[in-house]
Image (cartoon, grey):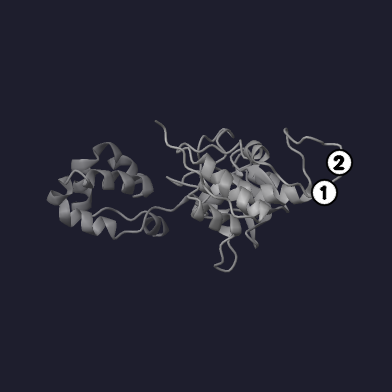
Amino acid sequence: MEGEAENPGLSPDEKQLFEDLMPEDLEEILDTGFNRRHFIKLMSIAGTGVLAAHLLGTETLLARPLAPSLSDAVVENGVNVAFSVNGAKHSLAVDPRMTLLDALRERMELTGTKKGCDHGQCGACTVIADGKRVLSCLTLAASCEGRSVTTIEGIAQGGQLHPIQAAFIKHDGFQCGYCTPGQICSAVALLSEARHGDASYVTEDVRKGPAPLLLSEQEIKERMSGNICRCGAYPNIVAAIMEVHSGKVVEQHWNFAG
């Protein structure tokens, strides 16, 4: 009975729906249940209008819960890891190979952190761990034992936007928005680096002791160079960070080609 509760059988109408529209997935659905991937595929088919002839089967099917998510799955050879995310303590049994990115998205349902290249090259997955920027796609979840992680969901406090978030809105520092969570997390950590006097590749005098740095536009560009924006909103992003860092209003100067 327990197996039936996790993977309820299809009604005749539902089974006919999959036989007609998604025959290649029928066997998997009968074995493991109707999951998110099947739902998305069915919705893409809906865009063609062919679901009208299967209305009854569709209505009953979409009322069903999806198959168990990865958070419900049994982890074989798992390791226990306990760490804080956005101020809340979490204790998980994870596959030793699971990245922090997948743990956040699949196990904690914190989907603000984006999976871009999944190779540590685009910066979309940037989060803050113990005050430092990390690429969550290259960080093993098991290595986060005892650490404090902040994701984009934890940047605003009590409904109050972080100054970086407000500046991104003011200066239109995003277009499609996919890279924005990583950009904002990176920018917030950048402000902390400047306060602590952390040097970058273009810092003129690295021999000075730790002291707050007044970052130039070149410094900000260098420190944000690991975060890629396919839409090309770089001038706006730099302006937003410069305004928060300097405390002075930065006017956006538009240059039109031709």
Where does the image place residue 200, in percent across and percent down from the top left? 73, 37
Question: Which quadrant: the N terminus?
Answer: bottom left
Q: The residue under label 2 is which amino acid type?
A: Lys
| Residue found at the far front of this picture | 258
Q: Which residue is mark 1?
A: 211
Q: Secondary structure at mark 1?
A: loop
Placement of 235 over or under 90, stated as above or below: above
Seen as rendered, the residue at the extreme bottom is 158
The residue located at (47%, 42%) in the rendering is: 254
Residue at (61, 43) in percent of width and height: 136
Q: Quadrant of the C terminus?
A: top left
Residue at position x 12%, y 49% from top? Answer: 53
**Between 136 and 203, the one nearer to me in the picture:** 203
> Measured from the top left, where is residue 6 in percent x and y?
40, 56
Out of 217 and 33, give the one closest to the viewer: 217
Q: Residues within 10 Å of mark 2 (few under 14, many from 20)?
A: few
Amino acid identity at mark 1: Ala
Q: In screen coordinates, is 250 left or right of 46? A: right
Q: Residue 116 or 242: which is nearer the viewer?
A: 242
- Do we see residue 227 in this rendering? yes
Q: Are marks 2 and 1 in contact (CB under 8 Å)?
A: yes
Q: Position of residue 95 (x, y in %)?
A: 60, 43
Q: Which residue is mark 2?
A: 208
Q: How many marks?
A: 2
Mark 2, secondary structure of its residue? loop
Mark linked to residue 150: none
Q: Is residue 94 visible?
A: no
Picture quadrant of residue 218: top right
Pick the front one: 143 or 115: 115
- Local packing at callout 1 (Cα closer than 10 Å; few below 14, some 14-19, many 20+) is few
Q: Quadrant of residue 4?
A: bottom left
